[in-house]
Structure formats: C-alpha cells, structure tokens
Image (tube, rainbow, N blue to C red):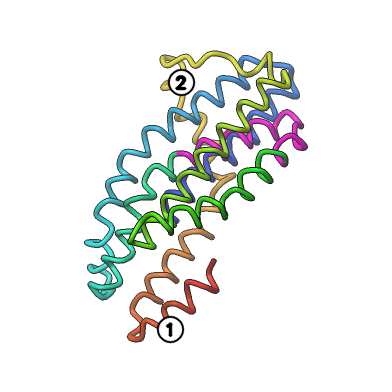
Amino acid sequence: CAGHAMFYGIAAGLETLAAQAFGAGDNKLVAGYLHKTVAMISTLFIPISLLMIFADWFLMAFGISEEVAHMACEYVRVLVPTIYLMGLFESFRCFLNAQNIFHIQTVPACIVYALHFVWCKLFLSIFESKLTALALAKCLTDFLNPLVLFLLVKWKGYCKETLLPFKRKSAFKGWGSFLKQAIPVGSILYLEWFSYELFTIQAGNLEKLENLAVHVALAN
C-alpha cells in the first residue's frame, strides 16, 4: 500500500500539472512532466522493492505472527514488478486525463480484466502454491494493462505532440519544483493509503487466522 500510495500520489500531481501545461498549449512541458514522473517512479521503485522482498522481517517486527508474515511475503515478493507496472499505468492514465482523453482507457481495461480470470485459472492449475499462482496472474494483468493502453494510443494516433521521446537528462532535473506542487495534490491519497497500512498491521495481530481472513476479504 505504501508503494502504491507514493506512485498514485505522484501520478495525481502529474495530472494536475500536465493539465495546466496542456491548457497553456505547452506540449513539451506536458511530455516533460510525464518523463519526470517515470523517472521518479523508477528511482523510488528500488527502495520499495527491497522493502517488499524483506517484508516478512518488517511484519514480524510489528508483532505479526511468523506464519502470517511468511505467507504474506511469499505473495508480495512475486508482486514486486507489479508495483512498478501499476505506477507506469497510473502515470500514463493521468497523462491521458490531463489531455481530456478518457474513453480510450476503457477498452483495454475491459479486455485485460476479463482475461484476468483466465490467468488465475491457468496458473492455479500449473503452480502448487496458490499464493504464487494468484500473484503471477496479477503480474501478467498489470503488465498487459499499460502495454495494451500504450499500443492502442499509438495505433489511434493520440498524443502525437505530447508523447515525445524520453530525455533522461531533463527527466532527472527539476524534481524539487515538481514535487513542491505534486505532494500537496497527492497528500490526501498518501494519508488514506497509509491508514489502510496501519489498519492491516493491527489486523495482522489478531490471534485467529479466521479473523484475519475476514479482514482481508472486507479490505479488498
């Protein structure tokens, strides 16, 4: 949740700033905001992925039982690429929203999410561990989401003036001014997601696994 909150918050800032630049007719600035967002997500992904890999240590440090911590970590470790993929998808979605391109996002989402049930059934029949199977299905869905959307945008010819080649030097500059405006926009989202994180830690300290299972079902 913490990783998602950071990426979604940055993407929310992108949507606001890119919309202002698009309204002013500055297409290069719109592209620059997208490039900065991708650069930030790529950089933050490194420490976030390490936290996910060693998630069982942190969970047990908060008093969660070893059994639950290892089960959670088994699932989370497979989902490491998903955090990055979801960050890219949300950034690209906000990039399109800033340019008033909404309808095209529905088509790939309907196709990919419909196929998610197929991946789940397929991987559950292949892998012995159900946690690993479901995590892999989610990884595949989250990989196809941004890929299909990007290919559809290119095929339809949208964003020709704003979807410019990635410039590494400019993408890693000017983060301060970007974050100064993006953080207040995403702050409400940060607080909301971190509250879910705290609630999950509290639920993880429940003695009975049945109660924990109820929490997971309701939270999702």
Secondary structure beneath dot 2 equals: helix
Q: Where is 164 relative to 216, above or below?
A: above
Q: Residues within 10 Å of mark 2 (few under 14, many from 20)?
A: some
Question: Which amino acid type corresponds to the residue marked 1 in the rendered image?
Answer: Asn
Q: Where is 136 relative to 131, above or below?
A: above
99 left or right of 189 in image = right
Would you name the residue on which mark 2 appears?
A: 171
- Residue at 42% x, 16% y is 168
- Residue at 54% x, 66% y is 220
Look at the image and tell me in which quarter the N terminus lies.
Answer: bottom left
Residue 97 in the image: x percent, y percent? 70, 35
Q: How many marks?
A: 2
Residue extending farthest to the bottom is 208
Tell me if residue 97 is in the magenta stretch. yes
Residue 218 in the image: x percent, y percent? 55, 74
Query: 217 or 11, which lies in front?
Result: 217
Query: 118 or 194, which lies in front?
Result: 118
Question: Which amino acid type corresponds to the residue marked 2 in the rendered image?
Answer: Ala
Query: 139 or 189, which lies in front?
Result: 139
Q: Residues within 10 Å of mark 1 (few under 14, many from 20)?
A: few
Q: Magenta residues?
A: 85-106
Answer with mark 2 or mark 1, whichever residue precedes in sequence: 2
Would you name the residue on which mark 1 appears?
A: 211
177 left or right of 130 in image = right
- Residue at 38% x, 61% y is 131
Secondary structure beneath dot 1 equals: helix
Query: 136 or 149, which lies in front?
Result: 136
